[in-house]
Image: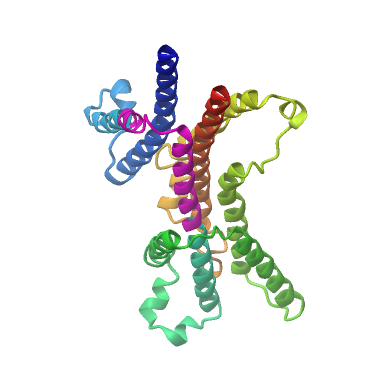
Amino acid sequence: MVKSDILINKYLLMNRFLGWCLITFLISFLINNILNLAFKLPHAINLFTNGDLLSIIPISVYCLSFFISFYISLILSKKSLSWDAENLHNFNLYFIRSCFWAVFLIGTIDVIISFMRVEDISNLIFDDELVRLLKKPSFVCTYIHMPLVLLSFFIGYFSKTLGFTWLALMIVCAELIIVITRFVFSYEQSFMGDLVRYWYAALFLFASAYTLFEDGHVRVDVFYTNLKEKTKSIVNAAGSIFLGISTCLAILFVGLNGKQSIINSPILNFEVTQTGSVGMFVKYQLAAFLGVFAISMLVQFVSYYFSSLSKMNELKES
């Protein structure tokens, strides 16, 4: 009996360490991406390709994440894996909830600014210098969008609703306004379509992780439904590691691989649509949505992995 308990504890420690390694590795990867873009520090692999000694810094960050994972696994050794799964899920809820508030606030404020810019209303309200600055994506993105993102994470801490239902309703209302203004008043501008695409992308990419938690994603149940509960847990755990998490890591590696990558480049250049000043300045955020999707899904897959293993342990004990 004692030997069996020791084996179970080692098994739990190993799996908890694997899960938290993925989380801390994600954080380390994002930190090193910022160090590379902001301070031009080389990637960790440069130490082996061209002998760049500055690569020791990102390597040290990765090594630190390894030890932090081991430390977390030790201090949580007496807790069940369901505790880890629940706390990771709660963090993910906060992250996604804050992102919802960000797209709501930025979409609303930016469409108002775009309307004033297109109809020259801003000239009646603001001075010439501010009117000129409001036509520059770098100014709007830095001094309007970024503070709204920070405000969103503050609101998300106190708000307890995800808001996906409201976001879907707002998309329908925005589409309805486009139809009415186009066919009744013969009025249409680029920023109106930009707003719908902006909210539509956020709805699907942000809600994906929560849908995974609710087991709402489409799956082929030809074999799965007939499996035993223990086998289902094994399939879910293995699928989380080899299919889900690997896909999220691939998105992050490709999207955040240097300044010219598909996520970093639009964000650094504050990329906007070809319509220019008559549209919304949010195209760069659509690239960031891919990063939000990959991060939230990776955290949720780790939570799903812990939850599946916890359920499997409960079935063993029963």
- Predominant SS along the magenta part: helix
State the image coordinates of residue 79 (x, y, percent, origin top left): 40, 33
The answer to if 144 sits in the magenta stretch is: no
Residue that protrudes farthest toward the front in the picture: 1
Q: Which residues are magenta?
A: 69-98
Q: In percent of the image, x 49 and y 65: which residue is there? A: 106
- In the drawing, does residue 63 fall left or right of residue 110? left
Which part of the image, by quadrant, shows the C terminus? top right
Marks counted in the figure total 0
Coordinates of residue 266 in the picture (x, y in percent): 47, 50
Name the residue nearer the viewer: 94 or 115.
94
Residue 251 visible in the displayed image: no
Query: Residue, x 53% and y 75% (percent of image)?
Result: 112
The quarter of the picture where residue 29 lies is top left
* Residue found 53% across the figure and 65% down from its top: 104
Q: Is residue 282 above or below residue 15?
A: below
Which residue is at the far left?
53
Q: Is residue 234 left or right of residue 21?
A: right
- Measured as percent of width and height from the top left, residue 32 is found at 33, 38
* Furthest residue toward bottom: 124
Q: Position of residue 113 (x, y in %)?
A: 50, 74
Query: What colour-coding does the image apply?
Result: rainbow
Quadrant position of the N terminus in the picture: top left
Q: Which residue sits at x=50%, y=69%?
A: 110
Say if 277 sits above or below 85 in the image: below
Q: Is residue 244 visible?
A: yes
User: Residue 70 lies in magenta, yes or no?
Assistant: yes
Is residue 102 placed above or below 178 in the rendered structure?
Answer: above
Q: Is residue 128 above or below residue 263?
A: below
